[in-house]
Structures are given as structure tokens and as C-alpha cells.
């Protein structure tokens, strides 16, 4: 083999190596562009919706038609989280304790809703999609209402977590219960719904 043939063989191997490196770089760049594109599209959708919208998987939408089960967490696009615990019966057999935990993962303080605490937390008999309380076939009475009111009337700072206790007595065991939560927001926040069963 003469010098020209040897030089030609080495050049072919170098070209192949450069081609492989170039393809690898192109694949990595394409992957990064796809990830950035998906992230940008998600941020664009959030901008259209507003950051007060629920950011939930389809299995549990958190809507009145597809309410969350006890213990589930509603997640909002701005980082706010709300978890409603399962009803815990007390010794008398008619009273139940429920906890509603607010976590402020947003970048601002949540000020109390000007409409009052009822706009933030509503607990009522029946299922979320029921058109009236009459469909519940039962009644509840809220206890310790003042304590919940005082907790809901205080601002919730960034990265702060607060649990609001709710105690109710029910007219019968097995009564369905709706918990509707709408954490404060500077413009609008979607309501999240839970369907619980008392007993």
C-alpha cells in the first residue's frame, strides 16, 4: 500500500467519526428543542387559562362532575395546593372532623377573599353536582365555625402551610358531603370539589 492509499484510508475513518459526532450533536439538539417546545407550549396554555386554574390529571379533574376523593390534593397552576382529609368520626358517632390543608407554593401572599370565608371554603350535604341541598336527603351542622373563619381570614404567605379544621354533625350515617374550596386569587381561581361520605 502506497502513502496515498494510507492517507485515503485514514481520511475515510476521520470522516465517518465526524459524521457520527455530528449526528449525535444533532440528535441531542433536537431532543432539547422538543423539550423546550413542550415547556413553552405548556407555559403558553397556562397564560391563556390564567394561573388560577386547576392543574390536574384527567383521572381526577376536581370539578363538580369529577370530584376528588378524600385525601386527594387539588393543584393549581400557580403552585397553590389544597388537600381535604377523610372524615374522622368522633366518640359520639354523629360528629366528624375533616381537615382542609392549604399550601402556598406560589410566589405571592394569598390575601383573604373579599367575599368572605364562605367563598374560600364551603361544606354542604349532597354531591357536588346536585342542583340543591334537597337532593342530599340529609342535613349537617357546622361546629367550631369561628375557628375556621379566623384561620381563613388571615393571609397565607409564600411557602406557608395552614390546616383548617372542620367539624360537622350529620343527620344520618353515610350522608354524602361536598367540600368546595376556592383559595384566594388576585383575579379569579377555579373551585375544586371533593366528595366525601360521613360514615
Image (spheres, rainbow, N blue to C red):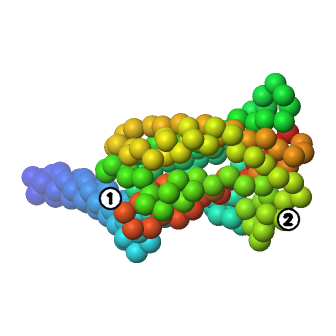
Label placed on residue 135: 2
Residue at horizontal 45 percent and vertical 37 percent from the top: 161
**Is 69 displayed left or right of 7 in the figure?**
right
Residue at horizontal 70 percent and vertical 58 percent from the top: 67
User: In the depicted view, which residue is nearer to us: 26 or 128?
Assistant: 128
| Residue at the limit of the structure toward the left, as seen here | 3
Label placed on residue 32: 1
x%, y% of residue 148? 56, 41
| Residue at the limit of the structure toward the front, as seen here | 146
User: In the depicted view, which residue is nearer to us: 27 or 48?
Assistant: 48
Number of residues whose C-alpha sits closer than 10 Å to that of mark 1, classed few (under 14), some (14–19) or many (20 or more):
few
Number of residues whose C-alpha sits closer than 10 Å to that of mark 2, classed few (under 14), some (14–19) or many (20 or more):
few
**Is 83 displayed left or right of 129 in the figure?**
left
Depth check, mark 2 against mark 1: the one in front is: 2
x%, y% of residue 155? 38, 46
x%, y% of residue 116? 50, 57
**Is 45 displayed left or right of 117 in the figure?**
left
- Residue 106 can be seen in this image: no
Residue at horizontal 57 percent and vertical 62 percent from the top: 191
Mark 2 or 1 closer to N-term?
1
- Identify the secondary structure beneath mark 1: helix
Dividing the image into 4 quarters, which one contains the C terminus? top right
Residue at horizontal 49 percent and vertical 41 percent from the top: 150
- Identify the secondary structure beneath mark 2: helix
Amino acid at each position: 500500500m502506497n502513502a496515498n492509499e494510507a492517507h485515503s484510508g485514514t481520511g475515510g475513518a476521520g470522516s465517518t467519526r465526524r459524521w457520527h459526532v455530528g449526528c449525535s450533536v444533532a440528535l441531542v439538539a433536537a431532543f432539547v428543542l422538543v423539550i423546550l417546545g413542550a415547556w413553552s407550549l405548556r407555559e403558553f396554555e397556562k397564560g391563556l387559562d390564567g394561573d388560577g386554574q386547576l392543574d390536574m390529571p384527567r383521572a381526577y379533574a376536581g370539578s363538580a362532575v369529577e370530584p376528588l376523593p378524600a385525601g386527594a390534593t387539588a393543584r393549581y397552576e400557580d403552585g397553590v395546593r389544597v388537600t381535604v382529609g377523610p372524615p374522622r368520626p368522633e366518640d359520639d358517632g354523629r360528629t366528624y372532623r375533616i381537615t382542609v390543608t392549604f399550601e402556598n407554593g406560589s410566589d405571592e401572599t394569598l390575601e383573604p377573599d373579599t367575599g368572605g370565608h364562605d367563598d374560600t371554603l364551603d361544606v354542604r350535604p349532597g354531591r357536588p353536582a346536585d342542583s340543591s341541598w334537597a337532593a342530599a336527603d340529609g342535613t349537617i351542622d357546622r361546629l367550631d365555625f369561628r375557628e375556621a373563619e379566623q384561620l381563613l381570614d388571615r393571609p397565607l404567605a409564600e411557602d406557608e402551610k395552614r390546616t383548617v379544621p372542620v367539624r360537622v354533625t350529620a343527620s344520618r350515617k353515610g350522608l354524602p358531603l361536598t367540600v368546595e374550596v376556592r383559595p384566594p386569587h388576585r383575579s379569579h381561581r377555579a373551585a375544586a370539589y371533593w366528595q366525601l361520605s360521613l360514615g
